[in-house]
Amino acid sequence: MRIAIQKYTSAISFLFSENLNLVAGLCILIPIFFLGFIGPYVFPLKGIEFASYPRDLPPSPKHLLGTDTTGRDLFTVLLLSIRQSLLIGLIAGTIGTTIGTALGLIAGCKGGIVDSIIRSVTDVFLIIPTWPLLVILSAYLERLTIPALATLLAVFSWPGIARGVRSQALSLRERAFVKLAKLSGENSLEIVFKEIFPNILPYVGTLFGLSMTGAMLAEVGLEIIGLGPSEANTLGLMIYWAIYYNALVKRMWWWIFPPVICLVAIFVGIQLLNAGLDRLYNPRLRR
């Protein structure tokens, strides 16, 4: 048992020492996820209501990120905003990736008329101008909540995923190991879930990361123009209020920079994590 544990530990240490992208991505994302999902339980949440404290206070031991023009503690607002923005990205990325992967696998593995129908529907969604339609739908929805916005963003994120997964499935179904599985008597579902899907799982993970960052970026864009969920604190809403109250003109860097830095860190961390996972699962990128 001790020898097995030592081998397992040495393998993990070798993996992380040789894959700097993976380590860097985890080092960036783990603290952000900690602040978003565990931070509100560790740090006491206070001053989230308007006029809770004096306005425009600079950072201090009492207020780590100062206060804004509405009298709210910005560190508390940042913790809640990180959680809501990550939830939007996770929900939209999960729904969009699931739909796109399922349709891509069906189209690539079945072929024929099924492939033609799914490809035609995918092409229709791909040519739709996404951003203007999102703006129109967000403006006409009476009450836009976090789940509703995430679902709306997922509706427009699956076509690209479906096309990518379809191309991978078309390539893999002609491989020798798939033909061998057919000769051995495996049915279509077994071939999809045992032979094809495990081989495209790293690619699906990369698509999930791209879908998640795209949803978060779209949410920020909608919030900046005043069409996002106004009842929930998000990083985009923090930026909106900072612009609305002229934080840059007032030189209130503690208001505008933290949400921007968090967004950039999330995007960079996800890209580094995708690069590290690609190197982990792609034999051509290993040393």
Image: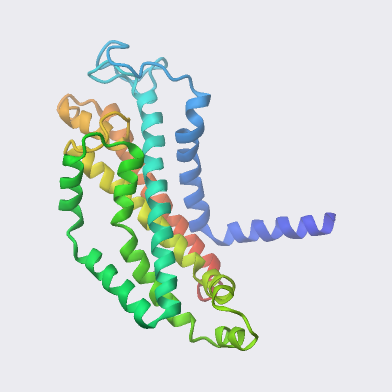
- Foreground residue among 59 and 54: 54
Residue 134 is situated, as x and y percent measured from the top left of the image, at 20, 49
Residue at image coords 33%, 40%: 261
- Foreground residue among 48 and 55: 48
Residue at image coords 58%, 79%: 187
Residue 270 is situated, as x and y percent measured from the top left of the image, at 42, 53
Q: Quadrant of the N terminus?
A: bottom right
Q: Where 53 falls versus 9 (above or below)?
A: above
Residue at image coords 41%, 30%: 79
Q: Where 1 falls versus 254 (above or below)?
A: below
Left or right: where does residue 100 sit relative to residue 251? right
Toward the right, the furthest residue is: 1
Quadrant position of residue 14: bottom right
Total labels drawn: 0
Q: Where 61 falls versus 256 (above or below)?
A: above
Q: Where 67 falls versus 188 (above or below)?
A: above
- Foreground residue among 3 and 145: 145
Residue 45 is situated, as x and y percent measured from the top left of the image, at 44, 20
- Foreground residue among 13 and 135: 135
